[in-house]
Image: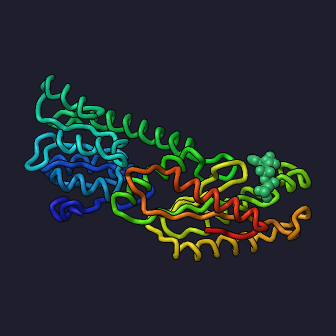
Amino acid sequence: MRLDEAEQGEVLTPKREKPRLLVVDDQAVNVRLIYDLFQSEFSVFMATNGEMGLAKSREIMPDIILLDVVMDGLNGYDLCRQLKADETLKHIPVIFITGQFNEEDEVYGFKMGAVDFIHKPINPVITRARVMTHMQHKLQADILRNISMLDGLTNIANRRHFNAEIERMWRNCAREQQTLSLIIIDIDYFKQYNDHYGHLAGDSVLRKVAESVTAAIKRPQDLAARVGGEEFALLLPNTPEENLCAVLERLFTNIRVCDIAHDKSPLGKLSVSAGCSSVIPKNTEDTSTLYKRADTALYRAKQQGKNQYVF
Ligand SMILES: Nc1nc2c(ncn2[C@@H]2O[C@H](COP(=O)(O)OP(=O)(O)OP(=O)(O)O)[C@@H](O)[C@H]2O)c(=O)[nH]1
């Protein structure tokens, strides 16, 4: 595709599996150069002004942004400031492309949160070296962040990720006045299971329950997490209480379909109990209310005979 054929903001190489580079520059010659330099390794996206650069960043979540400083409208510094103020975008490294070297401007750019500068006219060797270095750091940081958010046994989100997400979803639902729902799930008679079948079998059950819990949710914004030894949680933003039954029915069906023998349970099969709570969050309250209510409901489910859910 010739560059002048591309619509503004068009995806130049739309392969999802490659790392993503976004170049924000109003000069086609620079965009062309960047595209030629990186199109074999990265998916290269472009925007020709700051506003479009911000929208494109939110849409494609690039792994690195090359940002022209001088542009009409939102300039490079202002865009960088907005990117760094946005929780979801602030981890993306920004490299400024500048017309001339000016120490004061560079100091200002670094203060805005940039990781590096490239000078025009663009030197392909220097540009390549700098972009590759920062891209490598970014991808390694992503891997570490993902590992630190995952439960090692079940490969689903861990307590730390859950804690961060419940706070984030709480704030979003409070802003939009939408219901945030929480389901806490606990395996029944799991101590007896471990004692009878051994810890390795117990671990295998935890993996199967994690799969059943994850398969109960269908929307990408929902989160399944392992929040304790044999305790799991589902967080469902923008989900009123009346919509939870479908999720719960799927969860209990998934567990039944696993058909795991449990000789020490009165049922003879492995089962779970669940407690649910739903609220439209207020900024004056914190997430502990939601958690406590779900936990109390779970306690009642256990008291009432287990293998059931309670609101
Ligand atoms: N195999 C295995 N067991 C675990 C893990 N984490 C916690 N557990 C076990 O989970 C069990 C939890 O026991 P309890 O809290 O008494 O719960 P329970 O026996 O399921 O009782 P109810 O919830 O009332 O049905 C304990 O035996 C823990 O050792 C783990 O990672 N692997």
Q: Position of residue 57 (x, y in %)?
A: 29, 53
Quadrant housing the C terminus? bottom right
Count of all numbered marks drawn on residues in the image = 0
Residue visible at 67% across and 48% down in the picture: 228
Residue 255 lies left or right of residue 217; in this view the side is right
User: In this orientation, does residue 24 appear?
Assistant: yes
Residue at position x 39%, y 60% in the image: 173
Q: Nearer the viewer, residue 61 or 131?
A: 61
Where, by quadrant of the figure, is residue 208 drawn? bottom right
Residue 35 in picture, x, y percent from top left? 26, 50
Which coloring applies here? rainbow
Is residue 306 shown above or below 30? below
In this picture, is 51 found above or below 239?
above
In the rendered image, is residue 40 in sight?
A: no
Compared across the picture, whether 143 is left or right of 177 comes to right
Residue nearest the observer in this picture, 65 or 161: 161
Residue 79's x, y, as percent? 20, 45
Q: Position of residue 90 (x, y in %)?
A: 34, 42
Q: Quadrant of the N terminus?
A: bottom left
Say which of 78 and 275 sits in front: 275
Residue occupying the far left of the picture: 72
